[in-house]
Image: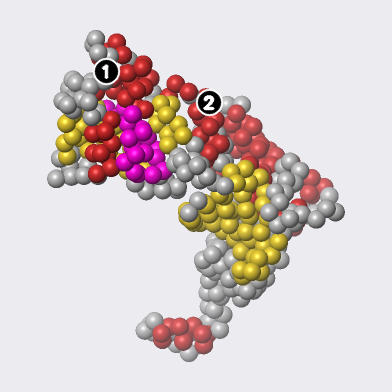
């Protein structure tokens, strides 16, 4: 087998795959329980396949959810945790009367007396309850390597802080807690529901068809002697399909139609290729050339209103901060129609909030509106707003004055909401 470097991008065969399909390299950092961390590079488009492969392990069926996302310089770190952690919601059983009496004294409650019958306080842990599982990993993506991501295992084993397996078939008391039931539907069941939903089958009809499938599975188990009694039937989570499960699959299908690509940079490129008429200006992020990410967009109808009411009218400009994972600013340009109703017309997503960057964006908007709608600006063909309203940001004021420096009639006012 060829020796791979620690930064080599590994690409397993198509389809879901687990950590066993990769070569892992230990790093100096250690996990919560003292074990060494391991890292491996994979293509950015294969993150979903790795996640599905880890979730479909028969002995540890679970879901990995994003618990925290943070930006560290030019890297984006997504923290995936097992759905059975990190909190511990297990309730210990109290079976002896002395423990009950001691607990009652601590709560300042009266016991039931010496002759009272001890009652075991046994509470079944729900199938989706968290049990203190420490299994989690990080997905680290960097702008320097847009085509690959780094998987960093913090804790591979599904164990709690005591070092014991806390869920799955190998957990203590797995048979009592129905650990063979996964916290969510299998991919086979989800694909069955998706296929019927795409065929426009009603949810009630899907439940009926599913019940027929379950009846057939139970019949086969009984014929094979596995389910001679109700207790011996091999139940699974798929047998408990509900209407809420079907609605969740519907929501997932709708979301899939809105996401172009798992990676944001590639998704933006695909969106621009599909809707070029909506893009006024686009600049990709480049650390080497020190060019920030910039995207200015609108719709043809809104841009026409921007030219119609912004010329010889008032334009409002404001920025919203902290609305996305990358920390970019969202700028909005708003105009007023003949009834003084505000209409947002142009938006810009900018990585940096500097005067020179805003100046470039303002100049691109002005040039594009004069190019598309020059007939609305009279004989001069120049876009001439009467005034601008913005906040007390110096960057915004400087960019407006530089772009419209020759238009002496254009004035910059402070937005009344800031006063």
In the rendered image of this protein, does residue 209 appear above or below residue 170? above
x and y, in percent, of residue 161 in the image? 59, 73
Q: Secondary structure at mark 2?
A: helix
Other residues around mark 1 within 10 Å, as few (<14) / some (14–19) / many (≥20): some
x and y, in percent, of residue 19 in the image? 71, 55
- Measure how far apart labels 2 and 1 are at the Cα level: 29 Å
In the picture, measured across the screen, residue 147 lies left or right of residue 121, that is right
Judged from this view, the residue extending furthest toward the right is: 1
Q: Secondary structure at mark 1?
A: loop
Other residues around mark 2 within 10 Å, as few (<14) / some (14–19) / many (≥20): few
x and y, in percent, of residue 228 in the image? 78, 54
**Residue hosting label 1:** 382
The answer to if 358 sits in the magenta stretch is: yes
Question: In the drawing, what numbered circle is on residue 273?
Answer: 2
In the rendered image of this protein, does residue 294 appear above or below residue 109? above
x and y, in percent, of residue 156 in the image? 66, 63
Q: Please name the residue shown 59% across and 31% down the image.
A: 197
The answer to if 74 sits in the magenta stretch is: no
Q: Mark 1 or mark 2, which is nearer the start of the sequence?
A: 2
Give the extent of the magenta segment. 343-363
């Amino acid at each position: 087998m060829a020796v791979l470097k620690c930064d080599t991008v590994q690409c397993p065969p198509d389809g879901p795959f687990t950590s066993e399909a990769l070569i892992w390299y230990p790093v100096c950092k250690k996990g919560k329980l003292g074990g060494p961390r391991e890292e491996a590079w994979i293509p950015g488009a294969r993150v979903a396949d790795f996640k599905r492969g880890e979730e479909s392990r028969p002995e540890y069926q679970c879901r990995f959810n994003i618990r925290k996302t943070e930006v560290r310089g030019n890297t984006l770190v997504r923290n995936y945790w097992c759905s059975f952690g990190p909190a511990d919601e297990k309730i210990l059983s109290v079976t002896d009367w002395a423990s009950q009496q001691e607990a009652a004294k601590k709560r300042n409650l009266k016991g039931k007396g010496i002759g009272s019958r001890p009652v075991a306080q046994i509470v079944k842990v729900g199938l989706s309850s968290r049990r203190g599982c420490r299994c989690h990993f990080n997905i680290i993506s960097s702008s320097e390597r847009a085509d690959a991501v780094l998987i960093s295992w913090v804790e591979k084993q599904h164990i709690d802080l005591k070092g014991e397996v806390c869920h799955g078939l190998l957990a203590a008391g797995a048979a009592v807690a129905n650990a063979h039931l996964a916290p969510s539907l299998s991919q086979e069941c989800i694909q069955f529901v998706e296929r019927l939903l795409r065929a426009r089958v009603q949810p009630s009809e899907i439940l009926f068809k599913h019940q027929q499938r379950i009846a057939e599975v139970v019949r086969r188990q009984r014929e094979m002697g596995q389910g001679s009694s109700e207790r011996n039937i091999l139940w699974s989570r798929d047998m408990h399909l509900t209407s809420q499960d079907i609605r969740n699959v519907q929501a997932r299908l709708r979301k899939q139609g809105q996401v172009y690509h798992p990676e944001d940079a590639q998704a933006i490129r695909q969106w621009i290729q599909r809707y070029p008429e909506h893009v006024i200006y686009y600049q990709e992020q480049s650390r080497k050339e020190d060019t920030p990410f910039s995207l200015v967009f609108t719709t043809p109808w809104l841009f026409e209103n921007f030219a119609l009411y912004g010329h010889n009218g008032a334009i409002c400009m404001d920025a919203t901060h902290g609305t996305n994972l990358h920390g970019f600013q969202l700028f909005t340009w708003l105009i007023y129609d003949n009834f003084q109703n505000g209409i947002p017309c142009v938006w810009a997503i900018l990585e940096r909030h500097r005067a020179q960057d805003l100046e470039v964006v303002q100049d691109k908007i002005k040039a594009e509106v004069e190019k598309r709608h020059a007939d609305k600006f009279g004989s001069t063909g120049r876009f001439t707003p009467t005034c601008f309203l913005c906040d007390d940001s110096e960057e915004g004021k400087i960019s407006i004055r530089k772009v419209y420096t020759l238009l002496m009639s254009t004035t910059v006012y402070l937005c009344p909401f800031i006063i």
